[in-house]
Amino acid sequence: MKIRVEYVAQIRDAAGLSSETLEVAADTAVLDLLRTVATGRGERLRGLLLDADGGLRPSALVFVGDEQFDLDEPRALRDGDTVTVMSPLAGG
Protein backbone atom coordinates (compact mmCIF):
# COMPACT_ATOMS: atom_id res chain seq x y z
CA MET A 1 0.00 0.00 0.00
CA LYS A 2 1.10 3.60 -0.51
CA ILE A 3 1.65 6.01 2.37
CA ARG A 4 2.57 9.67 1.99
CA VAL A 5 5.02 10.98 4.59
CA GLU A 6 5.32 14.74 5.07
CA TYR A 7 8.21 16.27 6.99
CA VAL A 8 7.85 19.67 8.67
CA ALA A 9 10.28 22.16 10.26
CA GLN A 10 13.47 20.70 11.76
CA ILE A 11 12.38 17.18 10.76
CA ARG A 12 12.21 18.30 7.11
CA ASP A 13 15.77 19.60 7.29
CA ALA A 14 17.00 16.35 8.80
CA ALA A 15 15.13 14.21 6.25
CA GLY A 16 16.42 16.28 3.35
CA LEU A 17 13.02 16.54 1.68
CA SER A 18 9.52 17.80 2.44
CA SER A 19 7.58 14.67 1.50
CA GLU A 20 7.74 11.25 -0.08
CA THR A 21 5.43 8.38 -0.92
CA LEU A 22 6.43 4.96 0.38
CA GLU A 23 5.22 1.50 -0.51
CA VAL A 24 4.69 -0.51 2.71
CA ALA A 25 3.17 -3.85 3.70
CA ALA A 26 -0.54 -3.95 4.47
CA ASP A 27 0.01 -4.58 8.19
CA THR A 28 2.48 -1.74 8.78
CA ALA A 29 1.97 0.17 12.03
CA VAL A 30 2.74 3.87 12.40
CA LEU A 31 5.74 3.24 14.65
CA ASP A 32 7.15 0.69 12.19
CA LEU A 33 6.88 3.27 9.39
CA LEU A 34 8.67 5.86 11.53
CA ARG A 35 11.48 3.42 12.32
CA THR A 36 11.89 2.64 8.62
CA VAL A 37 11.95 6.33 7.68
CA ALA A 38 14.34 7.25 10.50
CA THR A 39 16.76 4.47 9.63
CA GLY A 40 16.65 5.12 5.90
CA ARG A 41 17.13 8.89 6.06
CA GLY A 42 20.23 9.03 8.23
CA GLU A 43 21.47 9.48 11.76
CA ARG A 44 20.27 13.07 12.19
CA LEU A 45 16.65 12.17 11.51
CA ARG A 46 16.94 8.99 13.56
CA GLY A 47 18.20 11.03 16.52
CA LEU A 48 15.26 13.42 16.28
CA LEU A 49 12.61 10.72 15.99
CA LEU A 50 13.82 7.72 17.95
CA ASP A 51 15.36 7.13 21.35
CA ALA A 52 18.22 4.66 21.97
CA ASP A 53 15.74 1.77 22.27
CA GLY A 54 14.02 2.56 18.97
CA GLY A 55 10.97 4.11 20.61
CA LEU A 56 9.43 7.36 19.44
CA ARG A 57 10.82 10.41 21.23
CA PRO A 58 8.14 12.27 23.21
CA SER A 59 9.17 15.49 21.48
CA ALA A 60 8.27 14.16 18.02
CA LEU A 61 4.82 15.14 16.81
CA VAL A 62 3.19 12.67 14.45
CA PHE A 63 -0.18 12.97 12.75
CA VAL A 64 -2.04 10.40 10.68
CA GLY A 65 -4.39 12.45 8.57
CA ASP A 66 -5.71 15.13 10.93
CA GLU A 67 -5.33 13.08 14.11
CA GLN A 68 -2.29 13.17 16.38
CA PHE A 69 -0.69 9.74 16.72
CA ASP A 70 -0.75 8.37 20.26
CA LEU A 71 1.68 5.58 21.20
CA ASP A 72 -0.86 4.35 23.75
CA GLU A 73 -3.33 3.72 20.92
CA PRO A 74 -1.23 2.25 18.12
CA ARG A 75 -2.93 1.54 14.84
CA ALA A 76 -2.10 0.09 11.48
CA LEU A 77 -1.86 2.39 8.52
CA ARG A 78 -4.36 2.30 5.68
CA ASP A 79 -3.66 2.64 1.99
CA GLY A 80 -3.54 6.32 1.09
CA ASP A 81 -2.87 7.61 4.63
CA THR A 82 -0.75 10.72 5.06
CA VAL A 83 1.65 10.72 8.00
CA THR A 84 2.99 14.13 9.02
CA VAL A 85 6.12 14.24 11.17
CA MET A 86 7.27 17.41 12.88
CA SER A 87 9.22 18.72 15.81
CA PRO A 88 7.62 21.15 18.25
CA LEU A 89 7.60 24.74 17.06
CA ALA A 90 8.62 27.51 19.39
CA GLY A 91 7.95 31.16 19.07
CA GLY A 92 6.21 34.07 20.53
Image (cartoon, helix red, strand yellow):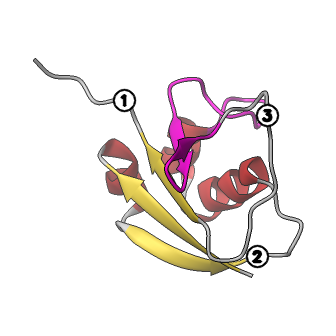
x, y percent for residue 49: 57, 40
Looking at marks 3 and 1 on the same chain, the residue that comes earlier in the sequence is marked by 3
> For numbered disc 1, what is the local secondary structure?
loop
3D distance between C-alphas at marks 1 and 2:
27 Å
The front one of 44 and 33 is 33
Secondary structure mainly formed by the magenta segment: loop
Residue 48, numbered label: none
Pointer 1 with pointer 2, Cβ within 8 A = no
Residue 24 circle label: 2
Residue at 62% in and 78% down: 22
Q: Amino acid at mark 1?
A: Pro
Q: Is residue 83 magenta?
A: no
**Residue ID at (29%, 46%):** 9
Mark on residue 88? 1
Residue located beneath label 3 in the image? 73
Residue at 48%, 75% (x, y): give it. 20
Q: Residue 18, position in %: x, y?
A: 35, 66
Magenta stretch: includes residue 53: yes
Horizontal and vertical percent position of residue 90: 23, 23
For this orientation, the residue located farthest to the front is: 66
Q: Name above or below for residue 34 compared with residue 67.
A: below
Mark 2 against mark 3, which lies toward the viewer?
3
Asked whether disc 2 touches disc 3, contact meaning CB atoms under 8 Å apart, the reply is no
Above or below, 8 relative to 49 = below
User: Which is nearer the N-term, disc 2 or disc 3?
Assistant: 2
Q: Secondary structure at mark 2?
A: loop
State the separation of the CA atoms marked 3 and 1: 21 Å
Image: 76 above or below 74: below
Category of crowding for the residue at label 2, using alpha-carbon neighbours closer than 10 angstroms: few (below 14), some (14–19), many (at least 20): some
Stretch in magenta: 50-69
The quarter of the picture where the N terminus appears is bottom right
